[in-house]
Image (tube, rainbow, N blue to C red):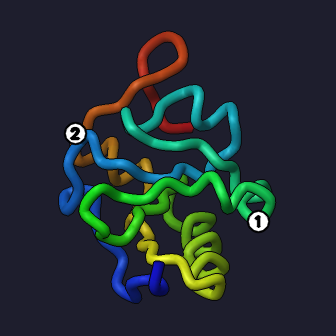
Amino acid sequence: MLGAMNTPITPQDLPDDALMVDVREPDEFAAGHAPNAVHIPLGDVPARVAELPETEDGSPLPIICRSGGRSGRAVQWLANQGYDIVNVDGGMKAWSAAGKQMVAESGTPEVL
């Protein structure tokens, strides 16, 4: 992996089934997330960096949170480690507002 893209991507730039890492807290993730999101809370990223998936096409791995702040911090740290990642601008709030597919552990998906 080569380092982060400087320009965030929008939810509209991603397919509904995009592979991404969601860095929100467990209750936020359980309430609603993208279908193929891998959950690694922000505080766990350094210890779980080996669990980061690689995209099939070699494109930068999207990192998402609620609104873009926590994922921005994760992107900065991961870029310093040499990972090819990109922040999803607006986070899950923008993902939901764009009408993108969401799933929940139970009930109707929502963004906390």
Residue at 45% from the left image edge and 85% from the top image edge: 2
Q: Is residue 15 left or right of residue 89?
A: left
Q: CA distance from mark 2 to mark 1?
A: 32 Å
Residue corresponding to mark 2: 99
The circle on residue 46 is 1
- At horizontal 62% and vertical 52% (from top left) the residue drawn is 51
Q: Position of residue 77 (x, y in %)?
A: 66, 79
Q: Amino acid at mark 2?
A: Gly
Regarding residue 66, the answer to whether it shows in the image is no
What is the residue that sits farthest to the top in this orientation?
A: 107
Please state if 42 lies on the left or on the right of 56 as rendered. Answer: right
Res. 17 in view: yes
Residue at x 56% of width, y 75% of height: 75
Q: Tag 2: Cα neighbours inside 10 Å, few (<14), some, or many (≥20)?
A: few
Q: Residue at x 37, y 49 (%)?
A: 19
Amino acid type, mark 1: Pro
85 lies above or below 16? below
